Image: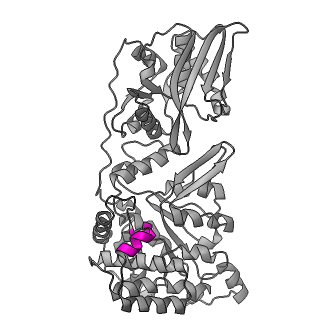
Amino acid sequence: MLATIASAALQGIDAELVHVEVNSGESGDPRLILVGLPDAAVKESDDRVVSALSNSGFKPPRTRTTINLAPGNLRKEGPFYDLPIALGILIATEQLVAPGIDDYLIAGELSLSGATRPVRGALALARLAKKLGKRGIMLPPASAAEASLVEGIAAYPITSLDQAARFLSGKIAITAAAQMSGITPNVGPDLSVGDFSEIKGQHALRRAIEVSAAGGHNLCMIGPPGSGKSMVAKRIPTILPSPTLDESLEILSIHSAAGQTLSGNDAHVFGRRPVRSPHHTISDVGLLGGGTIPGPGEISLAHHGVLFLDELPEFKRSALEVLRQPLEDGYVTISRSAGKVTLPCSFMLVAAMNPCPCGYLGDPRHECRCSPSQIQRYRARISGPLLDRIDLHIEAPALSINELRQEKLAESSESIRVRVQAARQRQLTRFTGTRTTSNARMTHAQIRAHCVIDTALGDLLQQAMEQLSLSARAYDRILKVARTIADLAAADRIESPHLLEAIQYRSLDRNLFY
């Protein structure tokens, strides 16, 4: 007897329909034959399924049984298919009558006892079920809770193979998972990482961080060891604006596809942006994404959040260079033999580095022992095209003893966040009806419409461009930063102080690197 069950395969952060076809009663040796381009994890499912069937009170097939995962040209990976394969065997061997099984999309891993275990990509599976017009989706409980974020599709939590069989046969009823309501805007920051009030001195750096967070601009901090670069970077999440509902769903989709099963206690569920800080030994694939079946890397996991690269020149040159296109476009396309996927990666890059290998170039209290050639080689690890894509370059000088001894607290994260949130709200209002959510992501047409400057300011910007030998890309980025500074000041137009401040954020890289 032939049974067909709808399941899915992940392709990047999206899901594609997979039909699990089970045919039993064939002549030949009694064994399971699995076809349809499965990987090793899928091939191992037959052993898990047989044990799960036996321990759930069912009989494993006693004839030759063929299991086909269609379409055959789509590579399948992971334990998605344990539950649909087991249910298909029950139907094919006439141990289960489930007339309404076509109404559901089914996925789940099975333990040897028959209990279910979560699978990744529940949000993508739920979106596919909704697109296909299914009545609901059957998933393990943790995955069903995640899938409930998709409106218009019922996510049924399945705890075991036996429960799934009884539900499909109409013997029991299962209540669909309640719509998860954890994603809410304007949630307070997570102060467990610290507060900006703890930062002593560094007023220029604090201001640059505020501008960067307000507009989603890329930023590079340059300073000696102990100047507070990493300390400031760790506190950036406390001033970031809350993501919108659409942004939160995109964040959740990527983390779900990467296998990070989400729950009600997850920070992203409660409206906070992701912050990723990979070690400088990370590979190109780990940073960009990829694998046999392409999946998200660190830049996609930082989507709508922050990617912090500490000790920037210590990263491999090849790893840094792969950032150039994603920084410009906000997405990355990865091609492998198994297929091609496009992953979103609209993130805010925050980088930190020393001015030289020893770190003390320009420090009045420490002597730099690096030779000019060593300094040049160190700085040459960061290419000009990559620097061009970083909007703000700011120096973090060493703190004096008097600054360290100050007892008075600086401005708190909460007060900075209020200004950042207000600036972002102005941007959301400005870009209503478009895919743009921050000034850093403005298109050329939007720059012409919203970054208008008068003739005097145009002459000023031209003079700065010529003196600093800046590129055409830097011209647009200066205007974007100036627009953000104007938003922080609640100004409708870019004025002279806004433009001058934006220009000075582009001057440091020319002094240090050229």
Which quarter of the figure has residue 68? top right
Residue 269 falls left or right of residue 289:
left
Residue 319 visible in this rendered orientation of the protein:
yes
Judging depth in this view, the residue of 99 and 311 nearest the camera is 99
Judging depth in this view, the residue of 99 and 304 nearest the camera is 99
Judging depth in this view, the residue of 378 and 499 nearest the camera is 499
Image position, residue 357 (x, y; %): 65, 80
Which quarter of the figure has residue 242? bottom left
Judging depth in this view, the residue of 396 and 226 nearest the camera is 396
Q: Residue at x 49, y 75 (%)?
A: 229
Image position, residue 145 (x, y; %): 38, 36
SS majority, magenta = helix
Which segment did they paint magenta? 439-449
Residue 461's place in the image compared with 328, above or below, is: below
Task: Reply yes or no: does residue 139 show up in magenta.
Answer: no
Which quarter of the figure has residue 365? bottom right
Q: Quadrant of the C terminus?
A: bottom right
